[in-house]
Image (cartoon, rainbow, N blue to C red):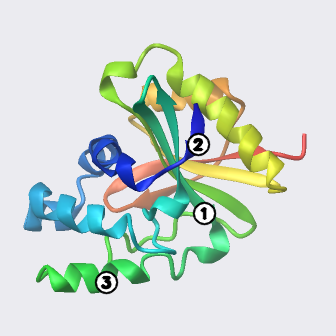
């Protein structure tokens, strides 16, 4: 079942999301540690308007288990989407103001910031099926361009995006990693 995330999903969402953070090798996670950052991110789930707030997370649930997550927002929200996190990070004694300093979305896009499948459900077609459903949800909202970034070294994710019709339109760095910027034309 594809649905909006709920408060009771937080403990299932967190480890799925952390797969992405681990791959990104973010400096703040190295400095502060995963345990403290997990507390910060989990508290952020409950902040309206935050990048990883529950209001920006959709989940695919099978038999009561969250098997995939999608986190996204319109590009025009990107400049302020991490504001709610600043207070939380400072509360925990973390001096950084955000996790990401790089611009990730292009003007006019609805940006899929994070997409991940729980490890035990990977390689079973759930990623592709979830993405196909997600594309329809975003199209039904009236959006025109759906975008995402995929690490150039992440072949399994790239396979899902190619298979579902995304096209590479550029490249950019997020942190120290090179990403392919991909778009899906929702008007077709």
- Of labels 3 and 2, earlier in sequence is 2
Horizontally, residue 139 falls left or right of residue 68, namely right
Camera-side mark, 1 or 2: 2
- Of labels 1 and 2, earlier in sequence is 2
Horizontally, residue 33 falls left or right of residue 106, namely left
- As drawn, the residue found furthest toward the top would be 124
| Dot 1: element | strand
In the image, residue 3 above or below residue 83: above
In the image, residue 133 above or below residue 73: above
- As drawn, the residue found furthest toward the right would be 188
Residue 135 position by quadrant: top right
Q: Which residue lies under the disc numbered 1? A: 73
Residue 19 coordinates in the image, percent (x, y): 29, 41
Q: Cβ–Cβ below 8 Å for labels 1 and 2? A: no
Camera-side mark, 3 or 2: 2
Q: Residues within 10 Å of mark 3 (few under 14, many from 20)?
A: some
Residue in the image at 66% along x and 75% along y? 76
Gap in angstroms between the C-alphas marked 1 and 2: 16 Å
Gap in angstroms between the C-alphas marked 3 and 2: 28 Å
Q: Which residue lies under the disc numbered 3? A: 86
Gap in angstroms between the C-alphas marked 3 and 1: 19 Å
Residue 44 circle label: none
Residue 165 coordinates in the image, percent (x, y): 72, 31
């Amino acid at each position: 079942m594809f649905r909006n995330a709920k408060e009771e999903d937080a403990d299932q969402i967190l480890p799925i999301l952390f797969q992405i953070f681990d791959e990104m090798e973010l400096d703040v996670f190295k400095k502060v540690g995963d345990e403290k950052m997990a507390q910060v991110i989990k508290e952020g789930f409950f902040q309206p308007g935050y990048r990883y707030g529950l209001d920006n997370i959709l989940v695919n649930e099978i038999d009561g288990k969250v098997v995939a997550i999608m986190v996204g927002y319109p590009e025009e929200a990107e400049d302020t989407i991490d504001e709610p996190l600043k207070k939380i990070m400072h509360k925990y004694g973390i001096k950084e103001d955000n996790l990401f300093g790089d611009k990730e979305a292009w003007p006019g896009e609805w940006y899929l910031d994070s997409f991940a499948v729980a490890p035990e459900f990977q390689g079973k077609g759930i990623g592709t099926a979830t993405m196909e459903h997600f594309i329809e949800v975003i199209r039904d909202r009236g959006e025109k361009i759906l975008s995402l970034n995929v690490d150039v070294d992440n072949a399994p994710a790239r396979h899902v995006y190619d298979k579902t019709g995304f096209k590479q339109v550029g490249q950019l760095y997020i942190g120290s990693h090179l990403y392919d910027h991909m778009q899906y034309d929702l008007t077709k």
